[in-house]
Amino acid sequence: MCFKIYYTCFSFVLVLFLTGCNFGTRTYPVTGTVNYDGQPLAQGMITLTPDGTSSNTGKSSMAEIKNGSFSIPKKYGVVGGAYRIFVESVESLGDDAGSKELFPTFSMDYHFQEGTNPPLTIDIPKNGKRK
């Protein structure tokens, strides 16, 4: 009987050790602004994708951009490490005319620190390409 209790306790400690006592990945919120041609981007979407080539295994995050600002809460935030950031935006062509891209999908690399990060500022030039 004593051996069973010892074995069970040992197994539990071994599982904790192998998982690093980490019961979930720690994520951090991200806030920021997006400017297009020097003005706050009226509307759009931002996607943060972990860079697997840099061993980042976090999850992707998305947020809506409104009046140049976006916010991703901690629950859906980033882990520290390298990310690829994508920004997309469309403009309305009228009631029945649909919409068109305001600029080609803008992308950039960014490295988030573990912990609190300052607000992210993204400046997209008129041609939509990074300088």
Image: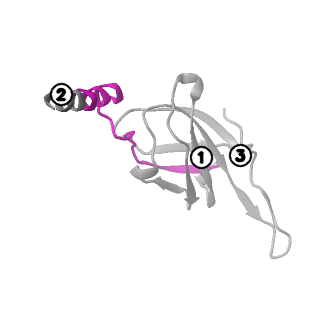
Callouts 1 and 2 close, C-beta under 8 Å: no
- The residue at which mark 2 appears reads as 6
| Labels 1, 3: front one | 1
Count of labels in the image: 3
Q: Is residue 103 above or below residue 84?
A: below
Neighbour tally class for label 3: few under 14, some 14-19, many 20 plus, Cα within 10 Å: few
- The residue at which mark 3 appears reads as 126
Which element type, helix, strand or loop, lies under badge 2?
helix
- At horizontal 67% and vertical 43% (from top left) the residue drawn is 125
The first of marks 3 and 2 along the sequence is: 2
Q: Toward the viewer: 29 or 39?
A: 29
- What span is colored magenta in the figure? 10-36
Label 1 to label 2, Cα distance in Å?
A: 49 Å
- The residue at which mark 1 appears reads as 47
Quarter of the rendering occupied by the N terminus? top left
- At horizontal 74% and vertical 43% (from top left) the residue drawn is 127
Label 1 to label 3, Cα distance in Å?
A: 20 Å
Residue type at the position of mark 1:
Thr
Residue type at the position of mark 2:
Tyr
Q: Is residue 13 above or below residue 29?
A: above
Residue type at the position of mark 3:
Lys
Which element type, helix, strand or loop, lies under badge 1?
strand
Quarter of the rendering occupied by the C terminus? top right
Which element type, helix, strand or loop, lies under badge 3?
loop
Q: Position of residue 94 (x, y in %)?
A: 81, 72
Q: Is residue 27 magenta?
A: yes
The first of marks 1 and 3 along the sequence is: 1
The first of marks 1 and 2 along the sequence is: 2
Q: Which mark is residue 90?
A: none
